[in-house]
């Protein structure tokens, strides 16, 4: 099967059937139009061929089209944040720093200097900085307006591609529709388009500060169109591998081609290839699913790759006996489908819910509202200060505090007899699921108990699926011996550029680096754009200096 091979962002127009050229052909044409370059026509490249032209590449490919990828695309498209003329930030020290370079966009300023001394609910300083510029003192209950204004400066546009499995918005399109977001609607919004203004124009009734995921998903999808970003987005794109073209320079054989690209693929002399350029490039392979369900492979080359995939790909597992049984679910959507189809109607045995986070609380509420009895199992004590419920104000999140109240007062330890509607088992964990729909629990003291259930729902978080990276990306985490997780082992990055410390020209943002809330992931976009713009400026200066040295005016 022929493969689309984007040899360069400017110099190749792919031909062939319209379906096969849909993704890469439009990308190439877009970059050519953007930079006003002519596009040469060449035949569709076979998988095992590379032309002899110098390897030109897409400056950056973004994997993931959720809010992280969308915000990064917005800033790469030339939108720059400036301090508003009338703005006064409530933090006098930060405001004084901002006044020092009012004429410069935040992208062109020293982010480390601006971030110094700021505190917030993110471990990434640039995320805290950008959040306090967009939502000053939000964690103290204030509703101050942003101190930034956005300007479109098209000369700052950096060509890029955003690849996503579904429509823009990512995992928000697959979340349970009946639940409210944990964050306020305006905390979910992206720069340049207020959520409430968008909702008003769409004549959508927003009854509370918290909104349904369906509303947020629709907002993100429309945001891409309203901001004119759709030319950079390619939907229904599935990534299969992301790899270096060549080994790093400190390897034993500097000229050896990587395991993923054999030497027979190179039909050019080695001296014709700029080694420094090749070693910087990434190869991104995948396929686009067409309307008829067929898969059309593609291959892209990129100077930089940004990982914005989020963490909803792989539900967390207990790794216990019997977890693979069909009556053990790992997602709210499966549980909701079972309820909708009436599979739990008339069941006398309770639903077994495992977990103490908000997803587990949502499941408890879902079952409770459908008159389905619940057995709720979780490892922590109900007094554990790290429980998410203790961080949520009661007035804003009454439904979650209702669940927490039941967790505390309807414990099996309080009443040996199981409650008809809900019973909690704090400080317990699952030892095994049995074929006869029984579950073996064990307490912190070692006592075992067997519970009969109708279906089990394991909601203990989710993990990113980075199968397309070498060793599933395990080597780029803080602990290179553990898989990537948003809490325990996020990707290790430079705190101000969001570049992976263990892999040059690979960036990550959002949940992959520990920023699970939309309000904080925007800082990742700022850091990455600041880094790329700075490198672009340095590269231009080197070209100018080199030209001057050769006598070029």
Image (cartoon, rainbow, N blue to C red):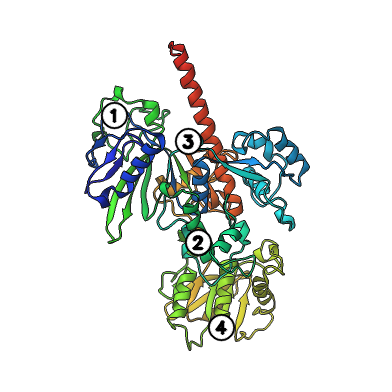
In terms of depth relative to the viewer, which is nearer, 545 or 360? Answer: 545
Indicate whether 89 appears above or below 218.
Answer: above
Where does label 1 land, which residue? 53
Residue 73 falls left or right of residue 383 = left
Label 4 and label 1: CA atoms lie apart by 67 Å
Count of numbered marks: 4
Of the numbered discs 2 and 1, the one sitting upstream in the chain is 1
Of the numbered discs 4 and 1, the one sitting upstream in the chain is 1
Residue 217: image tag? 2
Q: Could you say where residue 119 lies in the image, as x and y percent from the top left?
A: 71, 47
* Pointer 3 local density, CA inside 10 Å: few below 14, some 14–19, many at least 20: few
Where does label 3 land, which residue? 504
**Element assignment for label 4:** loop
In terms of depth relative to the viewer, which is nearer, 143 or 347? Answer: 143
* Pointer 1 local density, CA inside 10 Å: few below 14, some 14–19, many at least 20: few
**Element assignment for label 2:** helix
Of the numbered discs 3 and 2, the one sitting upstream in the chain is 2
**Element assignment for label 1:** loop
Of the numbered discs 4 and 2, the one sitting upstream in the chain is 2
Label 1 and label 3: CA atoms lie apart by 25 Å
In terms of depth relative to the viewer, which is nearer, 182 or 446? Answer: 182
Contact between labelled residues 1 and 4, with CB atoms less than 8 Å apart: no
Label 3 and label 4: CA atoms lie apart by 52 Å
Label 3 and label 2: CA atoms lie apart by 32 Å
* Pointer 4 local density, CA inside 10 Å: few below 14, some 14–19, many at least 20: many
Indicate whether 494 appears above or below 135.
Answer: above
Where does label 4 land, which residue? 373
């Amino acid at each position: 099967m022929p493969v689309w091979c984007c040899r360069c962002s400017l110099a190749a127009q792919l031909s062939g059937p319209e379906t096969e050229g849909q993704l890469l052909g439009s990308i190439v044409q877009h970059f050519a139009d953007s930079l006003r370059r002519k596009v040469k026509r060449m035949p569709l490249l076979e998988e095992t061929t590379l032309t002899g032209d110098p390897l030109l590449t897409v400056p950056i490919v973004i994997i993931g089209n959720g809010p992280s990828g969308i915000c990064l695309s917005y800033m790469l498209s030339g939108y720059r944040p400036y301090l508003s003329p009338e703005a006064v930030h409530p933090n006098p020290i930060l405001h004084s720093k901002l006044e020092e370079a009012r004429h410069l966009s935040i992208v062109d300023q020293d982010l480390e200097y601006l971030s110094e001394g700021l505190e917030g609910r993110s471990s990434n300083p640039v995320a805290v900085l950008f959040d306090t510029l967009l939502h000053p003192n939000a964690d103290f209950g204030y509703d101050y307006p942003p101190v930034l204004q956005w300007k479109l400066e098209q000369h700052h546009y950096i060509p890029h591609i955003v690849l996503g499995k579904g429509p823009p918005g990512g995992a928000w399109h697959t979340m349970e529709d009946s639940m409210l977001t944990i964050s306020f609607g305006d905390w979910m919004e992206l720069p340049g388009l207020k959520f409430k203004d968008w909702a008003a124009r769409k004549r959508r009734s927003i009854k509370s500060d918290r909104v349904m995921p369906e509303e947020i998903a629709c907002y993100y999808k429309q945001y891409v169109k309203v901001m004119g970003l759709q030319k950079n987005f390619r939907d229904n794109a599935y990534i299969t591998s992301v790899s270096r073209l060549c080994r790093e320079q400190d390897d034993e054989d500097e000229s050896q081609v990587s395991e993923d690209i054999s030497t027979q693929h190179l039909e050019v002399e080695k001296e014709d290839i700029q080694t420094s350029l090749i070693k910087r490039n990434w190869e991104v392979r995948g396929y686009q699913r067409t309307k008829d369900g067929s898969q059309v492979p593609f291959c892209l080359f990129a100077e930089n790759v940004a990982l914005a995939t989020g963490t909803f790909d792989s539900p967390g597992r207990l790794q216990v006996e019997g977890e693979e049984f069909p009556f053990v679910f790992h997602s709210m959507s499966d549980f909701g489908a079972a309820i909708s189809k009436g599979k739990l109607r008339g069941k006398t045995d309770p639903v077994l819910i495992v977990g103490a986070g908000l997803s587990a609380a949502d499941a408890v509420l879902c079952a409770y509202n459908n008159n389905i009895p619940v057995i709720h199992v979780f490892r922590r004590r109900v007094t554990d200060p790290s429980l998410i419920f203790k961080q949520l104000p009661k007035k804003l999140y009454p439904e979650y505090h209702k669940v927490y109240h039941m967790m505390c007062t309807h414990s099996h330890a309080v009443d040996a007899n199981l409650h008809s509607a809900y019973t909690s088992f704090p400080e317990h964990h699952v030892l095994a699921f049995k074929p006869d729909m029984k579950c073996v629990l064990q307490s912190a003291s070692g006592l075992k108990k067997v519970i009969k259930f109708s279906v089990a729902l394991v909601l203990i978080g989710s993990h990113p699926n980075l199968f397309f990276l070498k060793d599933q990306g395990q080597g780029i985490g803080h602990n290179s011996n553990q898989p990537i997780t948003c809490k325990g082992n996020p990707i290790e990055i430079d705190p101000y550029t969001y570049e992976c410390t263990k892999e040059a020209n690979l960036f990550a943002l959002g949940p992959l680096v520990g920023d699970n809330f939309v309000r904080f992931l925007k800082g990742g976009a700022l850091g990455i754009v600041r880094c790329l713009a700075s490198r672009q400026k340095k590269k231009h200066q080197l070209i100018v200096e080199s030209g001057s040295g050769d006598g070029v005016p």
